[in-house]
Image (cartoon, coloured by chain):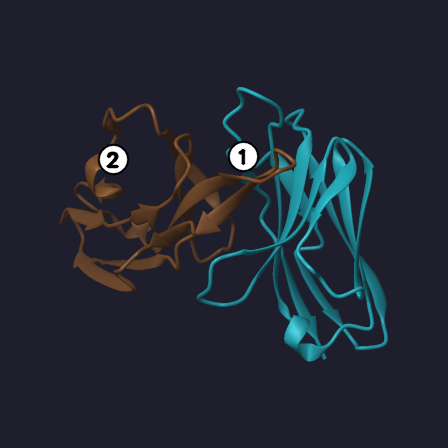
Chain colours: A brown, B cyan
Amino acid sequence: AQKVTQAQTEISVVEKEDVTLDCVYETRDTTYYLFWYKQPPSGELVFLIRRNSFDEQNEISGRYSWNFQKSTSSFNFTITASQVVDSAVYFCALSEVNAGNNRKLIWGLGTSLAVNP
Amino acid sequence: DTEVTQTPKHLVMGMTNKKSLKCEQHMGHRAMYWYKQKAKKPPELMFVYSYEKLSINESVPSRFSPECPNSSLLNLHLHALQPEDSALYLCASSQQGPGTSYEQYFGPGTRLTVT
């Protein structure tokens, strides 16, 4: 069965601290995609990154970086020098392809990040 | 700026009312989705439209009725809802077809309260 586990329910940090959000996944597919989404208090889910199963390169985008390791089935997300605007719920998700070639997202339960001034 | 728009932003309705949620995307995507999200939970998939045809219905009660008039529009018709249907309703769209990556882009959501 496919599954995404975000073990950290809530994290609280002080501004400028670095913080890592963990994501561990399970899948039998050889081809799959992993995603991170941010949901601020306003409610809109914002797409942050996609990674496919054949590309294990880490990625950096400004203060955000992602570490994908197939050996440990993990796709962790680090925010460097956190800011109050980073306060949000962050979801990790895995894409599944069903028989109709429709991709469903398997979601983790989310990690609520509070960055305090 | 979001390229998936949803109206209304907030909706309060009684259990006997009929209302509709609307979603529009301007990205040329051919897959569109309705999700329901309760507080502190991940989104729950309700329906998927692929090339304007309903391809996934996650056993959603018939009081929710989706409609896809064209490739850019998605509606969710609501009738005889229950208080437990109060939630944030999110619309999303994505590319569709071989070789595409399928990331979904979400609208801002409609916060629905059923009284």
Residue picked out by circle 1: B1
Q: Is residue B62 visible?
A: yes
Q: Residue at x 50, y 34 (%)?
A: B103
Q: Nearer the viewer, residue B71 or A23?
A: A23
Subunit of label 2? A
- B80 over A11 or under it: above or below: below
Subunit of label 1? B
Q: Nearer the viewer, residue B48 or A111?
A: B48
**Which of the 4 image quarters holds residue B87?**
bottom right
Across and down, in percent, residue A29 comes to 42, 36
Quadrant for the C terminus of chain A in the image: bottom left
Q: Nearer the viewer, residue B72 or A108?
A: A108
- A72 over A60 or under it: above or below: below
| Tag nearer the camera, 2 or 1 | 2
Across and down, in percent, residue A2 comes to 42, 49
Q: Is residue A64 visible?
A: no
2 and 1 marks on the same chain: no
Residue with the most extreme top position: B99
The local crowd at label 2, few if under 14, some if 14 to 19, many if 20 or more residues have their Cα within 10 Å, is: some
**Amino acid type of the residue tagged 2 in the rendering:** Lys
Does dot 1 land on a helix, a strand or a loop?
loop
- B87 over A101 or under it: above or below: below
Q: Nearer the viewer, residue B12 or A45?
A: A45
Left-right relation of A103 to A2: right
**Amino acid type of the residue tagged 1 in the rendering:** Asp
Q: State how far apart marks 2 and 1 are (Cα).
A: 33 Å
Across and down, in percent, residue B51 comes to 74, 30
Residue picked out by circle 2: A70
The local crowd at label 1, few if under 14, some if 14 to 19, many if 20 or more residues have their Cα within 10 Å, is: few
